[in-house]
Amino acid sequence: MTERLISTQATSGAGTIFEYRVAAIMLGRLLRSAHVPVGTSQPLVRVGLQRRNAGYPLDDIVAHTLPREASLVAQTIQIQVKVSLPIATKNEDAAFVKVMAAALDACRMYRAEVRAGAMLLGLAVGEDSGAVLPDLAYLAGKARAHVSPQSFEEQFRPGAVSGKRRTLYANVSAAVATAAATDDPLLVLSMVHEVLASLHIWHVAAGHDGVEWRAELDALAETARGAGITASDLLNQLCLLAEAFAEHGGLVDAAHVRRELLSKYSIDLPPPGASQQGRLRGLTVNIGQINGSVYNGEVMNFYGHSLDR
């Protein structure tokens, strides 16, 4: 008798592996003081992993940013990570319904911050089941363009948007209704608008040949070279650190990640900005050679000011 075949992803922990790879990309961005990939245009200052006990319903990754210079308000984005996310609507145990339930909890727990734009919600998804992620991002962008649920809903009249997007909107509404255990249409409309207006979609290609993974390899190449290792080595070690941090609900900054890399793996990363300083120093030498001006051993620029300090 032929045995029933099963998915290798279901038995290999693909979702967990994917989560750590996404987290490694975030830790790499943290090391580089790069920006959060979705939601806010501010640079990362801290990254938390598995932060449910700290009060974040979308708990896989919680990214914190630096405040803008003109404001003391920093932003936080809670991100749920899924290797894939089929849009199921009626089963309360379905992954999408659970994500909507967590998003509703986040909106309730952080209502003031969500409405002010200081608390954002995110979905990081690997495989686009049914190719709906661009349309889900479209719905979220449309929700952010409307101050009221009613004006938002008007956009989904027949002929206003494609049938595919109207169907997705109906499915999201049904999933929210299932998550909230209510069939009150006005309440569901209000909750759908609130969730979508705060939601940001990150379609992450984090496999070995994935765009985001390889982009991070390129971005970390110079830092890794300064430590005498390859970018692949560094990013793979960040995967292991992500797993260790997640196990304990960790919250880390760049200095902490550097310390752990040195402590656990003897990887001594060059100080932040060291490569940039090296390029500037090399530039001053080249300018001095072109100008031919050296005074008391210092390279001078064209206006006679020292460039070697």
Image (cartoon, rainbow, N blue to C red):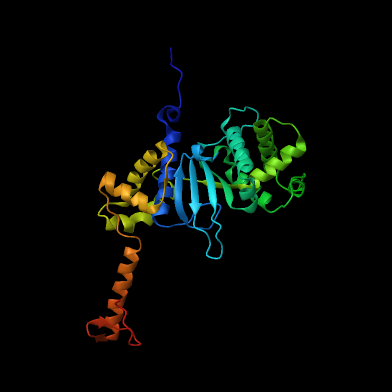
Q: Position of residue 235 (x, y in %)?
A: 35, 47
Along the line of sight, the residue nearer the viewer: 254 or 131: 254
Task: Determine the image quadrant of residue 294.
Answer: bottom left
Residue 233 can be seen, yes or no: no
Q: Total marks drawn? A: 0
Instruction: Note whether 292 is above or below 104 in the view shown.
Output: below
Is the C terminus in the top left, top right, bottom left or bottom right quadrant?
Answer: bottom left
Would residue 13 be found to the left or right of residue 119 on screen?
left
Residue 223 can be seen, yes or no: yes
Along the line of sight, the residue nearer the viewer: 198 or 45: 45
Would residue 261 be found to the left or right of residue 45 on screen?
left
Instruction: Note whether 6 is above or below 29 in the view shown.
Output: above
The residue shown at (60%, 41%) is 106
Q: Position of residue 163 (x, y in %)?
A: 71, 42
Task: Determine the image quadrant of residue 21.
Answer: top left
Task: Determine the image quadrant of residue 303.
Answer: bottom left
Q: Position of residue 175 (x, y in %)?
A: 65, 34
The residue shown at (49%, 57%) is 66
Q: Position of residue 297 (x, y in %)?
A: 22, 82
Specify the farthest residue to the left. Answer: 297
